[in-house]
Image (cartoon, rainbow, N blue to C red):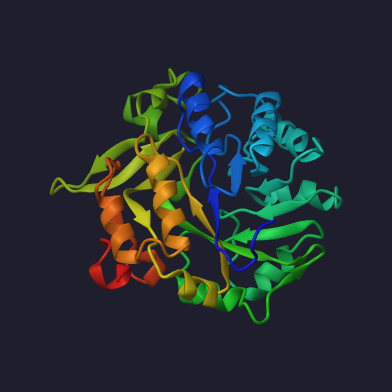
Amino acid sequence: MRNPERLQLSVAPLQYWWPRERMSAFYAEVADSAADTVVLGEVVCSRRREYKLADWMDLGRDLRAAGKQVLLATPTLVTGEAELRSLRETVQQGEFPVEAGDASALAVLLRTPAVRCALGPHLNIYNRQALSEHALPGATRWCAPAELPLVAVARVNPPDRPVVAGEGPLLTEVWAFGRLPLAFSARCFTARHHGLNKDHCEFRCRDDADGLVVRSGDARDFLCLNGTQVQSAGVHALVEDPASLRAAGIGSLRLAPCASGFARVLEVYDGLRDQRLTPRDARAALRDLPLPGELVDGFAHARAGMQRLSEESAA
């Protein structure tokens, strides 16, 4: 039985397109990790068909057998009837809770109130009233938008006055590790970079295991292109004392997969939440890893998102 006072660790949906064999190996590592929750599904581009719904469900059963709570995510941007049909199938599969990626998922969930669900980080929920309005009967958790500062998260869903849905108080999750999702488009940024259009993209995003970095005029890593998604070039790392996070009403930390070192990332955050590692130790351990970008934490502290992880914020 989970300790309600212990921070949970949640593995976010894979944002990149990895070969099937690599994905299988990755989730085998996750099955043996300290993660409590795993969110599965393709959330960036419907042209990525390495796994179909049946495959995600088979993987979900394997992870559930390993003791993980599993959710199936819906796309962040639904742009056509085929994607809407796929969304409906995900909501109606009936075996796993669903994480709503956009408003179209909420509309389908409203028509199927018996489905347990989570409110994903790309929904426009930035205040308590919005969270209350989005609290569907089956909702159990809310992942705050990645750019929402911790002080604002605490006001939206405070621990002493949490928003209540049909299942009870909503658990608050925050984006704690990984490149930050900044924007989505119906067009493909990666295809455009290669002089292609989305319908004839040649699946170029398969060549970039952690996305394609864009540099500024002064040669600084600025953004990252990932198909229809734009991410931060820096890797967000929320490294705080667990007690301060709990005091802000936070119950879960979302960790987004990267191509190298993610198993160690899970170990570091597990040590941090159990206070076997201090925030300073955790920061140092993350810096030793072959991560795809420098560590940043500005958004969490109401500053520019690309601000580097500081000694003060990790102390």
Q: Residue at x 42, y 52 (%)?
A: 177
The one nearer the camera, 134 or 250, is: 250
Report the label total. Answer: 0
133 relative to 166 in the view: left or right:
left
- Looking at the picture, does residue 182 appear above or below residue 85? below
Q: Quadrant of residue 246?
A: bottom right
The x and y percentages for residue 239 are: 38, 63
Counting from the top left corner in percent of width and height, residue 179 is at 39, 48
**Could one spot residue 3 in this view of the protein?**
yes
Quarter of the view holding residue 38: top right
Horizontal and vertical percent position of residue 167: 80, 62
Q: Identify the image quadrant of the C terminus.
A: bottom left
Closer to us: 71 or 302:
71
**Is 39 left or right of 241, judged from the image as shown?**
right
Q: Which residue is found at the position 70% from the left and 56% from the top?
A: 1
Image quarter of residue 162: bottom right
Residue closer to the observer: 61 or 180:
61
Q: Give percent across and percent down for residue 16.
A: 45, 34
Q: Nearer the viewer, residue 72 or 186?
A: 72
The residue at the far front in this view is 276
The residue at the point 64 percent across, 49 percent down is 102
Report the residue that reaches farthest toward the left: 218
Q: Is residue 21 above or below residue 246?
A: above
Query: Can residue 178 be seen in this snapshot?
Result: no
Q: Residue at x 35, y 29 (%)?
A: 208
